[in-house]
Image (cartoon, helix red, strand yellow):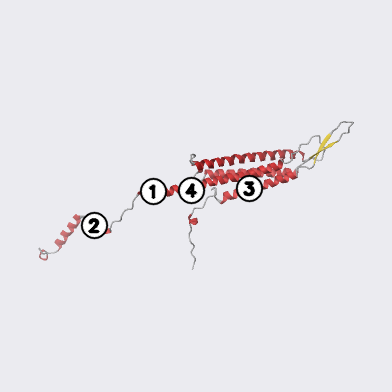
Amino acid sequence: MPQRMAVTHADLEPSRSKTDLSSKTGAFLMVLTILIGLFCFILCLIAEATRSEVTWMDTGGKENGAKSECVYSGSGKVPLLCAASAFVGLAFAMVMEHAYMLIAVSKSSPSLLTWDPDSPSAKSLTWQAGFFFITTWICFGVAEILLLAALNVESGHLKNWTRQRTGCHSIREGLFSAAGVYALATVFLAAGLYLTALRAQRMSEELVNVRRELLEASALYASPPRSPQPQYMSTVARENPTTRETQNELLLSMFPTPFIKS
């Protein structure tokens, strides 16, 4: 015999759309953003370990006057490639995550844009969202500026890097590491912004459910139940007395008068 499966409440719930904050798509994009941030941090550490260093040498004698020239320790291809990958990867993660959140918030049901601004919960979540949004973009901007400066310096000696020069531009120690820390902070702050928006959506859904239950309860108790009437009473009430008298007259005319007792 075929086995019957019980229908649960989860089976009756409508499936969430891909633009919903609590959907699998939102969780996947959030995890992907964090992984990209970790990858950018590792690339920055590699760039820090392989960055080009400058060595100064005295080429002139004491009688001719001191003259110093510099030479690079490497061509800078590895740190340049790592910095460029981290720059593009972090920008892609930020644009992807914030574009999705913007679409999800604008299409949320119930809408998060129609919250009561005077409620304490709405004020708290608004301040949290504002803090995460501002700090996320500040960290992102600082990380991108540091990486852009490193790209400019490392790309200046790709050719003839072994030739001695009178002036050499170098990157200070810790610049790539600082860019990686800011990139890592960017993705974690973006995760905080996502969790704040998700919490706001769930609170909004709970408020809508409470209001619906209150309306259903008030509608149920506002109209008292009506007692059903017996069927024979309604049938008798609908019968016309004039029609009953006409039927009696017809019966009397059908029988002869001797059979009718006085």
> Foreground mark, 4 or 3?
4
Q: Is residue 94 visible?
A: yes
Sequence order check, earlier mark of 3 and 1: 3
Is 4 on the left-hand or right-hand side of 133?
left
Examine the rendering and report whether any part of residue 109 can be seen.
no
**Mark 3 vs mark 1: in front:** 1
Q: What element carries label 1?
A: helix
Packing grade of label 3 (10 A; few <14, some 14-19, many >=20) is many
Mark 3 vs mark 2, foreground winner is: 3
* Numbered disc 3: secondary structure: helix
Amino acid residing under circle 2: Val
Residue at horizontal 45%, vertical 48%?
210
Between the C-alphas of marks 4 and 3, the distance is: 29 Å
* Residue at horizontal 55 percent and vertical 40 percent from the top: 127
Residue at image mark 4: 206
Residue under numbered circle 2 = 236
Q: Which amino acid does label 4 sit on?
A: Glu
- Residue 81 appears at what percent x and percent y? 72, 44
Q: Compared with residue 167, is residue 97 higher up or lower down, i.e. above or below? A: below
Q: Residues within 10 Å of mark 2 (few under 14, many from 20)?
A: few
> Where is residue 136 drawn, in percent x and y?
61, 41
- Number of marks present in the image shown: 4
| Contact between labelled residues 2 and 3, with CB atoms less than 8 Å apart | no
Q: Residue 218 carries which label?
A: 1
Q: Which mark is residue 34?
A: 3
Q: Residues within 10 Å of mark 1 (few under 14, many from 20)?
A: few
